[in-house]
Amino acid sequence: MTTKAAGQPSRRGPYSKSTERRQAILAAAHAVFAAHGYRGGSLQDVADRVGMSQTSLLHYFPSKSDLLLAVLTWRDSITGDGTTPPDPEEKLVDAVIRQARFNEEIPGVIELYTVLCAESVTDRHPGREYFTERFDRLRRSYTRRFKELADEGRLRPGVEPEAAAATLIALWDGIQTQWLLAPESVDMAGCLRGYLELVLLPE
Amino acid sequence: MTTKAAGQPSRRGPYSKSTERRQAILAAAHAVFAAHGYRGGSLQDVADRVGMSQTSLLHYFPSKSDLLLAVLTWRDSITGDGTTPPDPEEKLVDAVIRQARFNEEIPGVIELYTVLCAESVTDRHPGREYFTERFDRLRRSYTRRFKELADEGRLRPGVEPEAAAATLIALWDGIQTQWLLAPESVDMAGCLRGYLELVLLPE
DNA sequence: GTCTATATAGGGATAGAC
DNA sequence: GTCTATCCCTATATAGAC
């Protein structure tokens, strides 16, 4: 059964049954961690959604923290966060708004990020390193972007690129939290655009 | 023993032994929830810090969720969040910076807020209503403040008071998260001041 | 690769003695 | 008001049969 056979679904490689199973587990874990957080979500919840036993799940991911890190990496690949290099042709405002609207459309993406990010600041949380590095990387990336804009004379005088980078990221995270608690009262894209139009000068 | 006696520490009223115990429990619970979150923190942790049994703790707070809500209310009384009416004489920038620096000095205050706020968006979290109402109240309060400034011609043209309110709160929350993960790399007060100086016109 | 059974630990909450 | 003992539930992880 384990030997190769044309047309068999158990063939090796990136499209093997095993890989599909892993994908299904990641999707289920994404939903569970988004709804209950890392500590609040259980492997049993995830296993039930996939339709397998909790012990079978541990065959694919040896521990709960391994599963968490895999989910975080998987999130990056879905959202493009940290994987897609910024398009130098696209304006910063447009790129931010586009990403904000995209995230808004995928259920659970914002919940997962918001919940796990704050949870990660607690003692010995397995996701802490991931978020620390993500913020470092993002701050550097946006700082570079704002410096380029400053060189073009498009940054409002008095605004420091480093501060603008941290501010944009902070605003983005914070407005997502408010949006989760009151989607009707908060205009995520509007707040982001408002800040960027404030900090950037028209061409 | 339960009858009144001059000089006895077991007298009734706001300074009774029981009240002191409750205060000690609240302080311990504040530290535990800040370090581990609501779901990650245990009543046993709290009881150990106070030096009592877990069951004795439940004599003061009948359930874990009751304890959480008491801690959140206690936090308000410490920080003045939601209890102290804004001083109309103090400039908005000064008030925000002063509060930010104050929070920074009290260990655990920012952790507690950040962790519980994000955790509260998860399913059936007992703190959810508290945070939803807090955001509603804060947005209304800052919106009013920005409208007053707009009437004085001190709000930069094109900035909407409602958006500025949500943005200021979001920025504040988000920068606290970054600060918790990298205190040396993030200037909380600087980012807040930077935004307010951008959105407000000089007198 | 999947399962059952189990080890081991911990959680919140209740009953009732003192 | 404080405790011990306990109930009952849930959790992650391991062992081993199939």
Image: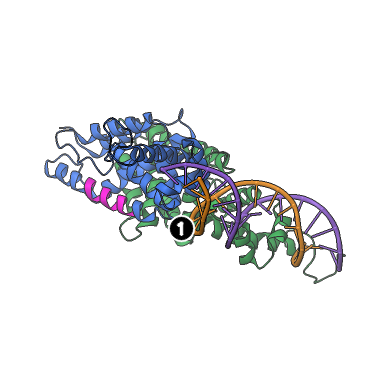
Chain colours: A blue, B green, C purple, D orange
Magenta range: A132-142
Residue B173 x, y percent position in the rendering: 42, 46
**Left or right of A141 in this view: B165:** right
**Left or right of B173 in this view: A139:** left
Q: Is residue A150 above or below residue B183?
A: above
In the foreground, B199 or A172:
A172
In the foreground, B71 or A104:
A104
In the foreground, A19 or C10:
A19
Can residue A133 be found in the magenta stretch? yes
Residue at 14% x, 44% y: name it. Answer: A148
Can residue A154 be found in the magenta stretch? no
Given the image, on which type of amino acid does mark 1 rest? Phe
Residue A153 x, y percent position in the rendering: 13, 41
Give the residue at mark 1.
Answer: B102
Residue at 30% x, 58% y: name it. Answer: B185
Magenta stretch prevailing secondary structure = helix
